[in-house]
Amino acid sequence: MSKEIRSRSIENMIRKIPIILATIVALVMLLNACTTPTPTQAPAPTLAEPTTAPAAPTAPPTAAPTVAPTAIPATVAPTPAGPVAVMPTPAAGTPSATAAINTWILAGPGTNYPVYGAMLGGAQAQVIGVSEDNKYWVVSVPVAPLGQGWVDAATVQTANTGGVPVVPTPPVPVPITPTNPGPNDPQVQVIQNVYVRSGPGDTYPAYGVAFAGTNGLVLGVSDDGKWWMVRISPEQVGAGYGWVSADWVTATNTSSVPVVKAPPSQTPVTLPPPATGAPTATATDYVNLRTGPGTNYPVLGVAAPGATSTILGKSQDGQWWVVTVPTTLTATGQAWVSASYVIVSNAANVPVIPAPPAPPTVTPVPPSTGAVIGTATEPINVRSGPSSQYPSYGVVPAGAQGEIIGANSDNTWYQVKLPTSVAPVGYGWVSAAYVTVSSGTVPVAPTPPPPEVVQPIATPSAESASVATVLEAVNVRSGPSTDYPSYGVAPAGASAPVVGTNSDRSWWQISVNPANIPEGVAWVSGGYVYVTNSANVPVVNAPAPPAQIPPSEPSAQGAPYGVATDTINVRSGPGNSYTSYGVVSAGATAPIIGKSSDGTWWVILIPTSVAANGQGWVSGAYVDAYNAQNVPVIPAP
């Protein structure tokens, strides 16, 4: 062999050394990837998860870099614990990223975001964007809420990424710290940052994020064994608990924890599409739409990740946005959404919108031994009937427990015991969507008839006029107290001119249609309306309290009778235009002897000292009737 040939052979071998070394490194990574431990056996991670926010991003670049912004470390990271993300393979010539080491796929560009999954060394992903500071690439992750995740640019090599768009940084989630367990308590330890959700599934809204290394006291497990319920201070989460995925925690001493039934998941609301150039909010995860700017306000519905709506305004502290929702969800067409779960655009100049009044709080009767127990997962309206058409007694706070005594026919509403000081009949109705239920069955309860709707007169056009806008269906009464009878209900979204108020400004006198109410005015509770230009509304005298008609008992067991569910006028005929003899108080009983031709009014027995014929008419909307199926029709006088 000639010296020239031997020289070329040596040179070729030298050139092949880097290739041989790269192959050895790849084989090491592949072996590591094949030894991924199961989630419950994984060691604590070595990647720290700081709780502080990342440094403020620099100004967005005009075009993305074509190579990884920083050098790739030479060492191989430990195999991640938790699920490995399944990602589409990038097509040839398209923007792509190849993991040089095992790396995390995050919900945002920083280690204080929750983890969606692991990307093993050598895996490829489609690059669809870059962070504002060039330190993270956005890759396609179909199972993630927005179909995307973020990977540290220092851990991947990229190709064909010139010109990929800059993706806005999502808000950093609120930190959640579960209650710390004792040594022998059932408990979990968080492997990697994980969302704490309101239910056992990714479609339930998140309360915030629990960071890696956190320990939590376990209260229960989902029926499929894939989610743990952990105790959280009610000061952080009103319900007092949240759910974490078993994929991202290790569990200890949990063999005897109870199975907890999940609350019903909600169908996401379809939001009206914004106009071009309008200020918008786009959900980064499943997010609650509320009646006001705070978690003490009830939930109207849920928006899905990627849902976009027009922004109408913001809260005084800038932590909540007012967005457009369908009027089928709320008559006002408006809802409040937390700034922690939306990305906003063109919103610099939206106005501050005052918060509506916080709803009054209702405490259910403590459950009796052996009762079916319901626990509110969110603040929830308790109503006089199983629909938002019925007026609200107030709001049961998140975490409150009550005794469930009935349900409607499709189990979408539960009947719960209430103090008679709140609901004189001793019960109210709550939506099943925000209640977890202990084991047991409840009977189907009769549904009360829907209340009569009272239409206010048209609101004035002058900007200085005082106007009341109804936030929740509210009783319209003859005076400023629940001791006065209700004429009917003003629906949510209705508005009316305000003409007066009581001395402590807790009730408002509004103008109403004389066709509904002959006096032309009525009163609504301030807890359920928002009043503009209220400073100059005059104090007016309340009308005299109505005369009380004493209750009477049924003549015999099994005889027809009714129980008043509210203070109610007893009239000379079946309609508000008939003379009132006085009122029966909520909870009062009376024998039923007949009904109107349309079945909406009952004829009851009253003392002859009140009406010479001993009969009076009461609206069926405010009466629970028993044994009255076969009472005769009595013609109206």
Image: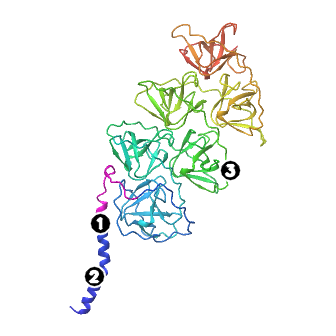
Secondary structure of the residue carrying tag 1 is helix
Q: How crowded is mark 1: few (under 14 residues within 10 Å), some or many (20 or more)?
A: few
Q: Which of marks 1 and 3 is nearer the N terminus?
A: 1
Provide the residue designation for mark 1.
28
Secondary structure of the residue carrying tag 2 is helix
Residues under labels 1 and 2: Cα distance?
22 Å
Q: Residues within 10 Å of mark 2 (few under 14, many from 20)?
A: few
- Tell me whether circle 1 and circle 2 mark residues in contact (CB < 8 Å): no
Instruction: Give the answer, above or below, for where 130 lies relative to 204.
Output: below
- Tell me whether circle 1 and circle 3 mark residues in contact (CB < 8 Å): no
Instruction: Give the answer, above or below, for where 331 lies relative to 104.
Output: above
Residue 91 visible to an observer of this rendering: no
Residue 466 image position (x, y, % from top left):
75, 38
Q: Residue furthest front?
A: 183
Residue 396 image position (x, y, % from top left):
54, 33
Q: Which of marks 1 and 2 is nearer the N terminus?
A: 2
Task: Write down the quadrant of residue 461 in the picture.
Answer: top right
Residue 369 image position (x, y, % from top left):
42, 24
Provide the residue designation for mark 3.
351
> In screen coordinates, is 439 left or right of 455?
left
The magenta span reads 31-47
Q: Residue 339 — which label?
A: none
**Residue type indicated by callout 1:** Val
Residues under labels 1 and 3: Cα distance?
58 Å
- Colour pattern: rainbow
Q: In which quarter of the image is the N terminus?
A: bottom left
Q: Which residue lies furthest to the left in this view?
A: 1
Residue 157 painted magenta: no
Residues under labels 3 and 2: Cα distance?
71 Å
Provide the residue designation for mark 2.
13
